[in-house]
Amino acid sequence: MNQFYGWMLSLIFLGSAVGNDVGTTAQGKPLTEFRNRANEMFKAEAGKPLKREAKQPPLRPGSGNYTRAYSYSIVGFAARCFHLGEMPDEANAALVENAKHYLDNPKDIIDRDSFHWHADIVMRLIDMYGPNGTVHPGRLTADTEAVCLKPIWLYVKESAKHNKPDHATTKSWHFHSTENHHAMDFSLQWHFAKIARNKPDYQKLKLDNGSSLEDYYRAWNEYIVVYFRERAKKGVSIEIMCPGYNSVWLKGFYNFRDFGEPDVRRSTEMFLDLYWAYWAQEQLHGVEGGGKARIRGVNGFKHATHGIPALGWFYFGIGEKPKIIQGEINALLSDYEPPAVVAEIARSARAHGPYEIIQRAQGLGEQGVGEAVMSDSMKPNKFRTDGGGIIRYSYCDPAFTIGTLMTEARPLKDWVHISAQSRWQGVIFGNNPAARIVPVVRPEGKARDVLNGQWSVQSKGSLITQKLKGHKAGGPMIVWMPLEGMGALVRDGDAVFVETEGAYAAIRVVGSDFQLTEQKVSNPSMEGPTRVAPPGRVILPIDDFAPVILEVMAKKDVTGFDAFKTKVKANQPEMKGSLLVYKTIYGDLLTFDTSQKQTPTISGKPVTYAPKKVLESPFLHADYNNGVVTIQKGEHRKVLDFNR
């Protein structure tokens, strides 16, 4: 895996799709900062030979070979060669070699962990550099194109049985597998149909349902427009703010935007604008904040520089320079960039003090049946959008972001698993990308994930959370903090206090003693250095179901650490039977039913899990089920109308 990551670093050198001259576009215009950042690294890769990554054995019984790293190394090399106009014979030979591997190993084509991760990049290379390419036609030869399309046709023919452009009946909310796999699947289906429908070898071929590729292309065009409209209406993402999965979810969308019909291009560009505003308003120095889903294993205890944060660095120059690149190549080869208003949000959203973000997200529904490879036994996930589900709440101060996914204490059967899987909540601090406080239910034994692990209530910088009785594979409830970027922990009675460069925090376990230790946290079922958390400290309640209170306040809002401690200790939690009543350091009265029967309240009002707005913050506004989103920063404003 380390070799794979090392190879993926080279993908960030693929730079601009609009010309070879460093510093200018093909039209002679100055390159943007985004292009210059890519080109700074791009030049360093010139002339280097192909370094193939190894083909690995199946990840699980019944799967195909695990060839993601191998294929990424091939397509990355080819993209670099075509972009620079160097080693064309070697680049074409590498793509042919890759395609022939899959033709010789057809089970690898329908394995969800390998083929569609790179195949959309192949389609981009054909569209940019193939015989009819939009950038440098002919660098990818007609013979290479013909071989490359063969395994992709086999994939599309099989996947068309399962993921269908059925927006008329499902509004795009029924789909197989996970959000990112579904997007990689239908973006590849769309792109193949777009190119192959006019090829003599494919023009007369039919899918199993009798559709021609022309019919299929038109159907996917309609689906894509509806898909983005529905996300603007009902919730941007299901795998919420997951930096790795979101980047591969988006990667095929850049192909829609660059190569699609006008309606597809327009809808996709609006959605990319929406996504980057959604990310920009909440990130703090490039670190994504707030509640998240599918933050698996120990990933929530450290900041990744690959995926979405990597693109954040390329687009806005914020955060850390990326060291690992995985699914970002289409974005780096695209001429899409977020609009100026989004860049302004990313760079200066917190300049005028703290603000709240409230977002409605989908997650309720019927869990499908997935397979490691595509098969007739698969059943789709079916999301329901007729009621409440998740309220994503974040409080964004210049010194920190604290956020959670507020849900009802529902049983797991009410949720589609990708929404309930490995939910993350807690605080990130602005002084250091490593600094954070994470209250979370850890996996039990050798389980990889917890489903439906905890529930919560939050107002401003105050959060109450508890392990859910309706969890699956949940082990101990812990509060985790790194050694890096955090001061010494100070235990005072039932509370633990800590300070960072810009903020103070307190953790209180209600009605239970707890252990405070420094310990290694890892994923027992997985191996390798990336599966171990950084050195950290753990608060471990003796009572697994004891509620945990987390309070955070900026140093500028209190006269000192002692004053903060006094403020926290003055607000003692009170148990009225099973009901926890607590006045926060911000003056809000929270109630939280530890029996998990009643809805929490904030200042006397029950939490509303179905608010009228799907997006609400100083920078993003949209009514639920409306389809019109306003992005705003000061006098700068952009309206995205997905209904046109």
Image (tube, rainbow, N blue to C red):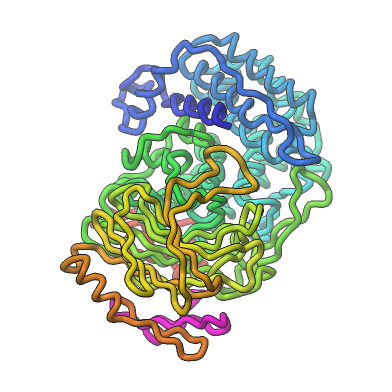
| Percent position of residue 531, x then y | 55, 43
Residue 128 location (% of width, % of height): 53, 25
- In the image, residue 193 sits, relative to residue 166, either above or below, namely above
Residue 294 place in picture, x, y as percent? 56, 54
Q: Is residue 261 visible?
A: no
Image quadrant assignment for residue 437: bottom left
Q: How many marks?
A: 0
Residue at 47% across, 29% down: 333
- Which of the 4 image quarters holds residue 596? bottom right
Question: In the image, what residue occupies the spot 38% across and 74% down?
Answer: 494
Part of the protein shown in magenta? 585-611
For the question of whether residue 104 can be seen, the reply is yes
| Magenta stretch, overall SS | loop
Q: Is residue 589 magenta?
A: yes
* Residue sticking out furthest to the bottom: 576
Q: Is residue 594 above or below residue 28?
A: below
Q: Is residue 151 left or right of residue 9?
A: right
**Identity of the residue drawn at 58% across and 24% down:** 73
As drawn, 105 above or below 383 = above
Q: Of residues 425 and 102, which is closer to you in this image? A: 425
Seen at 32% across and 54% down, the residue is 429
| Residue 354 spot, x, y in % from top left | 27, 63
Q: Residue furthest left?
A: 559
Can residue 595 be found in the magenta stretch?
yes
Which of the two residues, 383 or 350, is positioned nearer the viewer here?
350
Where the N terminus falls, by quadrant?
top right
